Image: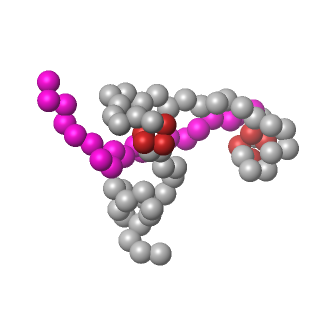
């Protein structure tokens, strides 16, 4: 599997990958991460929805792979 302790390599760091290029942006100053707050009864893909309506996301970390310092 290789070295999983590479937080700047999205292929091995785990989680979801989001690329600004995919949404037509070249840069962003802020990114809003928002939970859809949806739960479908009997959904076994997201079993947390089955636990008494305690749905929500669990954000452990955010990594910036290609960033630059603000020059202001």
For the view shown, which residue lies furthest in the right direction?
42
The kind of secondary structure the magenta stretch mainly shows is: loop
Q: Quadrant of residue 12?
A: bottom left
**Please, is residue 35 above or below residue 42 in the view?**
above
Residue 15, given in percent of the width and then of the height, sits at: 51, 52
Residue occupying image coordinates x 49% and y 37%: 23
Eyeballing the image, is 71 above or below 20?
A: above
Question: What is the span of residues highlighted in magenta in the rendered image?
Answer: 53-72
Spot the residue most to the front.
24
Tell me the residue at 19%/31% (across/down).
70
Query: Furthest-left residue in view?
Result: 72
Q: Nearer the viewer, residue 53 or 45?
A: 45
Q: Is residue 64 magenta?
A: yes
Find residue 53 and report its horizontal and vertical position in percent: 75, 32
Residue at x-position 59% and y-position 38%: 57
Q: Is residue 53 left or right of residue 41?
A: left
Where residue 61 appears, as percent x and y from the top left, is: 42, 45
Instruction: Tell me which residue sits at (37%, 59%) in the image.
Output: 9
């Amino acid at each position: 599997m290789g070295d999983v302790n590479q937080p700047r390599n999205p292929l091995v760091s785990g989680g979801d990958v989001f690329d600004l290029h995919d949404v037509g942006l070249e840069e962003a100053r802020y990114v809003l991460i928002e939970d859809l707050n949806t739960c479908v009864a009997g959904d076994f893909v997201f079993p947390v929805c089955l636990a008494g309506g305690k749905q929500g996301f669990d954000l452990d970390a955010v990594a910036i792979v290609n960033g630059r310092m603000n020059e202001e």
